Amino acid sequence: MNASASSSPATAPAGVWQGARRRLHLQEVGPRDGLQMEQAFVPTADKIALVDLLSTAGLAKIEVTSFVSPTAIPALRDAEIVLREIRRAPGIVYTCLVPNLRGAERAIEARADELNLVMSCSETHNIANLRMTREQSFAALTGVVALARQAGTAVNVSLSCAFGCPMEGDVPFDVVLDWAARFVALDGVRGITLCDTTGMAYPTQVEALTRAFRARFPATELTLHFHNTRGMGLANVLAAIAAGADRFDASLGGLGGCPYAPGASGNVCTEEIVHALELMDYDTGCDLPVLLQAAWRLPALIGHPVPSQIAKAGRRLDLHEPPPDFRAWRERALARG
């Protein structure tokens, strides 16, 4: 059964539009998912300073870096130094992506709070992205989970292409949930992230899959990871909230992307999502002015503007002075009676 056949129109309760201070958890992935896509190498000291600033913004989790081969992703070749030298704030989980056993060993040595493991729900995407079949990925990641359990390090598993594959099309819900089940059954896996890797998700689909996941795995920590590739990022976040989700990845400045979605925009933007949700009376725990300070640093670090509209236009009630001639215009208007 594919996603289209299994989805039904969302019947989002009116309450989704009134947050009523419902607590949502925002997880920053920009230092990893954002910077890995950049051509410019951000100096190590600047990476550390950026994470330190983000640590004051009230985020639930920060994905600091990725322990992949420096040849594969040279932008993150300083992973050990960054993870060791950041200032860690109480209550924040400092996570990192690890692709294999060696990456896990490096991350554990560098004191990662959590390992984020990745495989795709799509066989084609998994081979293209990881050079392995899904079964080969699962076998390899099982070993990583065992190592993390021995080290006392938490594990999250991110399932790519949960909402569609750019090469296969729709991925059946049953396939997504069955792969989730195999990881949930492993001792040591704390959470699952359903990833909209190339921005193929749409709200009714998101609502249906989120409800199905929550019904099948009520005790598992669920994160939704959306991209804004086709302009539906915020709508997908709201659809997931309506279905019971409360934990979301987002990227500072809207950085990110995917090599299998050429020309695509990046992840949903942290400061835009926080801005919208707070206007709707959700409690994100985040300090929006601090997030904006961090976002304003990015263009100088990466050498180009960022997609974030809030970083460009400001918050809704960031007001402006009237035009210089306003007083004269008003006086003339009043004189006309």
Image: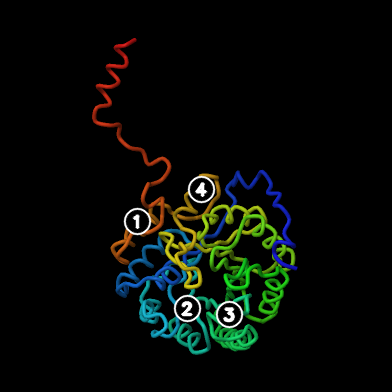
- Marks 1 and 2 sit apart, C-alpha to C-alpha, by 26 Å
135 or 186: which is nearer to us? Answer: 135
Query: What secondary structure is marked by label 4?
Result: helix
Query: What secondary structure is marked by label 3?
Result: helix
Q: Where is residue 248 in the image (x, y as percent from the top left)?
A: 55, 61
> Is 212 situated left or right of 261 in this image?
right
Q: Residue at x 34, y 72 (%)?
A: 39
Q: Position of residue 254 (x, y in %)?
A: 44, 60
Residue identifier under label 3: 126
305 or 251: which is nearer to us? Answer: 305
Q: Which amino acid does label 3 sit on?
A: Asn
Q: Residue at x 52, y 76 (%)?
A: 114
Q: What residue type is labelled 1?
A: Gln
Camera-near label (3 vs 4) is 3
Residue identifier under label 1: 293
Q: Which amino acid does label 4 sit on?
A: Glu
Q: Where is residue 76 in the image (x, y as percent from the top left)?
A: 38, 78
Q: Which residue is drawn at 45% across and 83% down?
A: 68
Residue identifier under label 4: 278
Q: Which amino acid does label 2 sit on?
A: Ala
Crowding near pointer 2: few (<14 within 10 Å), some, many (20+)?
Answer: many
- Marks 1 and 4 sit apart, C-alpha to C-alpha, by 18 Å
Instruction: Answer whether labels 1 and 3 touch (C-beta < 8 Å).
Output: no
Instruction: Check the picture and name the quadrant holding the C terminus.
Output: top left
Which of the marked residues, 1 or 2, is nearer the chain's N terminus? 2
Which of the marked residues, 4 or 2, is nearer the chain's N terminus? 2
